[in-house]
Every structure is written in structure tokens, then in C-alpha cells.
């Protein structure tokens, strides 16, 4: 038996080590990692520069608390301001906490405008995390049902439907719109840049905060630092986490300068949030992305998407292949049982299936062209084999 609560059902593989885009199990079998710990290890496994930062920080101090100053949270926040245009950051330890911060900010913003019961517009199929606030903004009934009562004040509308949001124009209680510009857990649902532009205009007209959750699609994944930059807009609030620490837990909620004063001393906090180790590593992650990896993500993404589209078109059971940068989904018509198990056992491939029939690829951003070609080839083999064995 296991002493862990049975909330996960991991595959039976036991990994011994990792390097770059590969992991090896105890029998020294090598796997190509096309999921990066669900969008986390952007720089792959055992990156030497990350190793160096972790060692160096552990030789000074790992933790001080927020009672004392250190340089790494300041430096990281400054760097984030440079790449986002959002000048005030609160650090936490996960994506869900980043969204909790955003929800609290929106409510505070509403209260300051005299709104007693502020409402936040959120999207159908959204995923924002598992704590009760973020869960209240999350759509999936399976995740919510057992835990009521959840927070009130969330209005669900169809994703990528501006008219559904415009319908709230006369509701004085609305304070914010929260969305993933590319829905990850839902299976890579992509909001167009045109929609995002229009949504930004609407939010500005209505004095609603535009709050983007780029926890999964941000930090270079789509070929730019953030997907919203492709729409040439800037949100009022941005949440990030996953890839920021390349595996060390860290999340952040960033705001536009005009909101930077909202969370005053004592109104919010976190014991571990902003700790020197996580911030130092995250700073290095951003530095490495900037100087070495970010510029080629877009080309790699096109390459992978192109290969998958040309190889998979014509195969049975493929509904669509879509993506932006290195965030790619292969949607199947019918689910394939044990797909991730077959992928790992027979095709040396680590991937993820979401919503039962959407294969989600979130490879490390350091993946080489050769690895991308291998990945596409293996997926083709996998889907062909599964289709044939189904017959
Ligand atoms: C993963 C994810 C979260 C939750 O992050 P955790 O670190 O697991 O709490 C929130 N939003 C999106 C879009 C995510 O992909």
C-alpha cells in the first residue's frame, strides 16, 4: 500500500535521473519528456546553471521570511516588470495562490469603489487551481462538486465569446474578467489576438480589471514572453507560476502600476512566498530564457505543429492538431485507453492526455530540432499503432 492520499494515479515508471529533455528509469531506459512536469521544466532537467544557483544560495541562506530584505525578490520583480510592463509583484508558491491574490485584488478594487458584492467574470472550461477561491473560478464540475459551498461572485461565460461578456455591461457589480488566454487543462483552447484586443477595450471602457492567468501559457511557451503580447495588449493583473522556477515552487501575481497600491501592509502575505532560493532560481530562469532560448521557441513550435499536422492528417481518429509555440494539442475523436502508458512503454515518450481525448504537449523550451522530429515521429507511430490495435 501507499501512504499517500490517492488523489493522483501516476504511471508505474520510476525515474532515476534526468538530463535536458530526457529522463531515465531504473533500468536505464530513456524517455523523451514532452510534458515537462506539466509545463514546469522549461529548461529541461538538471540544467547546470540552475544547479549552480541552487548550490550557491544554499551556501548563504535558504529562507529569511518577509520580515527581512534580500536582493533576490527585488531583482526578480524588477526583471518581471521589464518583461511584462507590470510594475508591482506579489510572490507566492504556486499557481493557485497567484490566482487567490488576483481574486483578492479584484474584490478589494471593487470594495474601494463601493461595490459590496463584487463579481468576476470567468470562463467555461477554465482551470485556475484547487484552493477554494481559485476553484470557485474553475469550471469543471468534477473538481468543484464535492467541496461546496464555494465562493460566490463568479459569473461563467462561454470562452472566446465577446458578446457573452458584453451582456454584463449594465451590471454595476462586475469588477474584473479573469481568463487563461490559452486554456491549458481544457485542452489548448486558444483565444484569438483579435478577441483579446476587443476584450481589453471593453474592460477599459467598463473599468473592469483584465486579469490574465498565464500560469501555463506564459514565460516563453507561446514564443513570446507572454501570449497577451502577441495581441499587443497589457492586462491589469497577470498570474504566473509553473515554469518560473523550473521546478522550484514559485508563483507570482503582477499588477499594473495603477493598482500597485491596493494590497497595503498586512492585507496579504505568505511565509515562503518570495524566498531567496526560489527567487534566485527564477531570476536565472528568466535570464537563460532571454539570452538563449526564447528567440527560437516560435520557430520550434511551427516546426513541431507542421510536422504533426502533415503526419497526422489522414490518420483516423484525429479531430484536430492545434497550438501556439510549444503548447500543442492533438484532439482525438475517440479516447484511447492507456494512451500515456503505451506512449511511455512502447514509444519512450512522456506526454499527457487531458479531457480524456486531448493529447497535450508541453515540451521543454530547450528541445532541439532533432528531438522535435523524433517526437513527431513517435507520436505518429503511437497513434497509428493505437488505431490499428483498436480495429
Ligand atoms: C496549473 C495551473 C494553475 C494552478 O497552478 P498550481 O501551481 O497547480 O496551483 C492555475 N492556472 C492554470 C492556467 C494552470 O495551468
Image (cartoon, grey):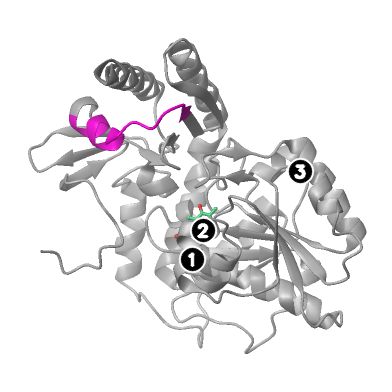
Secondary element at tag 1: helix
Q: How many neighbours does mark 2 have within 10 angstroms: few (below 14), some (14-19), or many (20 or more)?
A: few
Secondary element at tag 2: helix
Question: In this figure, which residue is indicated by the disc labeled 2?
Answer: 141
Q: Does the residue labelled 3 lie within 8 Å of ligand 1?
A: no
Q: How many neighbours does mark 3 have within 10 angstroms: few (below 14), some (14-19), or many (20 or more)?
A: few
Quarter of the picture containing the N terminus is bottom left
**Residue 232 appears in the rendering:** no
From the viewer's perspective, is the residue at label 1 or at label 3 nearer?
1
Question: In this figure, which residue is indicated by the disc labeled 1?
Answer: 145
**155 versus 42 height, above or below:** below
Question: In this figure, which residue is indicated by the disc labeled 3?
Answer: 161
First in residue order: circle 1 vs circle 3: 1
- Residue shown at 62%/50% (left/top)? 180
Quarter of the picture containing the C terminus is top left
On the image, which quarter does residue 149 sit in?
Answer: bottom right
The reply to whether callout 2 and callout 3 are in contact (CB within 8 Å) is: no
Secondary element at tag 3: loop
Alpha-carbon distance for marks 1 and 2?
6 Å
- Residue shown at 49%/36% (left/top)? 293
Q: Position of residue 386 (x, y in %)?
A: 29, 22
Q: Does the residue labelled 1 lie within 8 Å of ligand 1?
A: no
**326 versus 235 height, above or below:** above
Q: In this view, does 39 lie to the left or right of 220?
A: left
Q: What stretch is highlighted in magenta?
A: 331-345
Q: How many neighbours does mark 1 have within 10 angstroms: few (below 14), some (14-19), or many (20 or more)?
A: few
Judge by depth and name the residue closer to the eye, 38 or 372: 38
Amino acid at each position: 500500500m501507499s501512504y499517500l492520499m490517492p488523489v493522483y494515479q501516476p504511471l508505474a515508471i520510476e525515474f532515476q535521473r534526468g538530463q535536458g529533455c530526457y529522463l531515465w528509469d531504473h533500468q536505464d531506459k530513456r524517455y523523451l519528456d514532452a510534458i515537462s512536469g506539466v509545463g514546469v521544466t522549461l529548461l529541461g532537467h538538471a540544467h547546470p546553471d540552475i544547479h549552480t544557483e541552487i548550490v550557491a544560495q544554499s551556501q548563504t541562506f535558504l529562507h529569511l521570511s518577509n520580515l527581512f530584505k534580500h536582493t533576490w525578490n527585488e531583482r526578480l520583480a524588477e526583471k518581471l516588470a521589464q518583461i511584462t510592463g507590470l510594475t508591482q509583484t506579489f510572490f507566492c508558491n504556486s499557481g493557485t495562490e497567484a490566482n487567490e491574490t488576483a481574486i483578492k485584488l479584484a474584490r478589494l478594487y471593487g470594495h474601494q469603489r463601493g461595490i459590496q458584492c463584487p463579481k468576476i467574470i470567468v470562463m467555461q472550461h477554465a482551470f485556475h487551481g484547487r484552493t477554494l477561491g481559485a476553484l470557485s473560478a474553475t469550471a469543471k464540475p468534477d473538481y468543484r462538486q464535492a467541496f461546496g459551498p464555494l465562493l460566490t461572485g463568479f459569473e461563467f461565460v462561454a470562452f472566446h465569446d465577446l458578446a457573452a461578456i458584453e451582456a454584463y455591461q449594465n451590471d454595476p457589480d462586475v469588477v474584473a474578467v479573469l481568463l487563461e488566454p490559452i486554456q491549458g487543462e481544457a485542452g489548448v483552447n486558444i483565444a484569438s489576438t483579435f478577441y483579446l484586443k476587443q476584450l481589453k477595450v471593453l474592460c477599459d471602457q467598463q473599468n473592469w480589471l483584465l486579469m490574465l492567468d498565464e500560469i501555463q501559457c506564459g514565460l516563453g511557451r507561446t514564443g513570446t514572453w507572454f501570449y497577451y503580447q502577441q495581441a499587443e495588449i497589457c492586462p491589469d493583473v497577470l498570474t504566473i507560476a509553473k515554469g518560473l522556477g523550473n521546478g522550484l515552487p514559485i508563483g507570482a501575481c503582477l499588477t499594473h502600476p495603477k493598482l500597485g497600491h491596493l494590497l497595503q501592509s498586512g492585507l496579504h502575505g505568505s511565509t515562503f512566498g518570495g524566498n531567496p532560493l526560489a527567487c534566485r532560481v527564477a531570476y536565472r530562469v528568466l535570464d537563460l530564457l532571454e539570452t538563449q532560448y526564447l528567440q527560437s521557441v516560435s520557430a520550434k513550435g511551427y516546426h513541431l505543429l507542421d510536422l504533426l499536422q502533415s503526419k497526422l492528417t489522414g490518420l483516423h481518429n484525429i479531430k484536430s492538431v492545434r497550438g501556439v509555440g510549444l503548447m500543442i494539442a492533438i484532439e482525438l475523436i475517440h479516447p484511447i485507453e492507456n494512451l500515456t502508458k503505451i506512449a511511455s512503454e512502447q514509444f519512450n515518450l512522456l506526454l499527457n492526455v487531458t479531457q480524456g481525448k486531448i493529447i497535450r504537449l508541453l515540451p521543454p523550451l530547450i528541445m532541439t530540432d532533432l528531438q522535435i522530429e523524433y517526437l513527431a515521429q513517435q507520436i505518429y507511430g503511437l497513434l497509428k499503432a493505437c488505431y490499428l490495435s483498436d480495429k
